[in-house]
Image: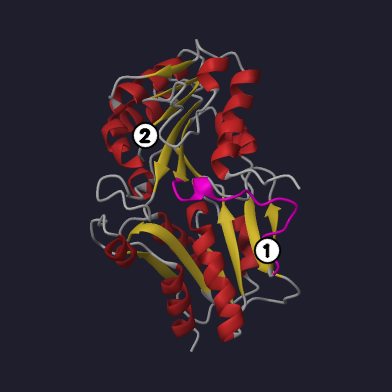
Amino acid sequence: MTRRERVAENLNRALHTLLDNDPSAYVIGEDISDPYGGAFKVTKGLSDRHPGRVLSSPISEGGIAGAGAGLALAGSRPVVEMMFSDFAALAFDQLLNFASKSVSMYGRTVPMSMVVRCPTGGNRGYGPTHSQSIQKHFIGIPGLNLYEASPFHDNVDVFTAMLGHEQPCVLFEDKVLYTRTMHTDGVVDALFRYELIGDDNPTARVFPVDSGDPDWIVIAPGGLTERVTGAMRSLLLDEELTCELLVPSRLYPFDVQPLLPLLSRTRRICVVEDGAAGGTWGEMLAQQLHEHLWGRLSRPVLLLSAEASIIPTAAHLEREVILQEMTIHRVIAEASQ
């Protein structure tokens, strides 16, 4: 039996595919060259195969993003890596004031095909400055697309979609997710199946085997897949509550319209995200859902986020801040009463 591909391996294959097929592609970041191959080994083997286009950079996130944006402006298609997404704050000026604006500020549309990879999230004991989920700080920037990796979306297709926009994109990659296996052939486990909905930037739908309309539909980015699916399993077995999960590939811009027929099958919706509340993707999505579905819902959209706190290093304290499977189960069970 062939071992299933892990998410980090799938990302590595996607980068190999890009560099093999596109001579204008570059990969730039700190410590990404072999033999190290990056902090999470996602870039392993790339520099040996493409030594002139896989470049280990100085420790300067602003410089990395600026170099990538300059290459994109000149017609290349770079992928740049922030070693931890927390450090993308140092690249924010390049993304806000250069890359995203260069698409349209010269009086004509200028292709800016670039991807900024951001290993993100906690649950690994890395502490306050290496564990954050900072997606919300990039929401709403015109010309900047946000994606999140998931175990349902093959990253070969995701990179094709991102670079096809000809606009800068940020790809958030949950660090725990790196070690998890990709799901294939529509099977999650004995209880759940999945399907991809939509041709461009598809959304994964995870649903119980042999079930009708769900009691709840949960919408969550890819990094929360394991925790939400675990909560769905215990809610089904312990509470007899059926839930479905929708996992989008692109977080922003996000159009809820194609999902309305699915969402109209339930009277309760929960949006789950890893960052702290306040100006978030989840709040933006909840606003869209209320606008379209308010008359059908039995209660306001339930929004679950991390605690408003720094993220501790100690595992037992970290678990109290970052959203966990048992919390998702408890809150949905209580909201069902």
* Above/below status of 15 relative to 260: above
Q: Is residue 337 or residue 145 the one in the foreground?
A: 337
Per the image, the residue denoted by label 2 is 83
* Above/below status of 126 relative to 286: above
Q: Quadrant of residue 244?
A: bottom right
* Above/below status of 103 relative to 278: above
Q: Can you name the residue that lies furthest to the top here?
A: 52
Q: Amino acid at mark 2?
A: Met
The range drawn in magenta is 174-190
Confirm whether residue 301 shows in the render: no
**x, y percent for residue 33:** 44, 21
Checking the image for residue 189, the label placed there is 1
Task: Report, in whole angstroms, how far the alpha carbon at label 1 lies from the one at label 2.
Answer: 32 Å
Q: Earlier in the sequence, mark 1 or mark 2?
A: 2
Confirm whether residue 75 shows in the render: yes
Magenta-colored stretch includes residue 186: yes
Q: Amino acid at mark 1?
A: Asp
Q: Secondary structure at mark 2?
A: loop
Q: Secondary structure at mark 1?
A: loop
Tell me which residue sits at (73%, 44%) in the image.
2
CA neighbours of label 2 inside 10 A, class few (<14), some (14 to 19), many (20+): many
Q: Can you name the residue that lies furthest to the bottom here?
A: 337
**x, y percent for residue 328:** 45, 72
Q: Are marks 1 and 2 in contact (CB under 8 Å)?
A: no
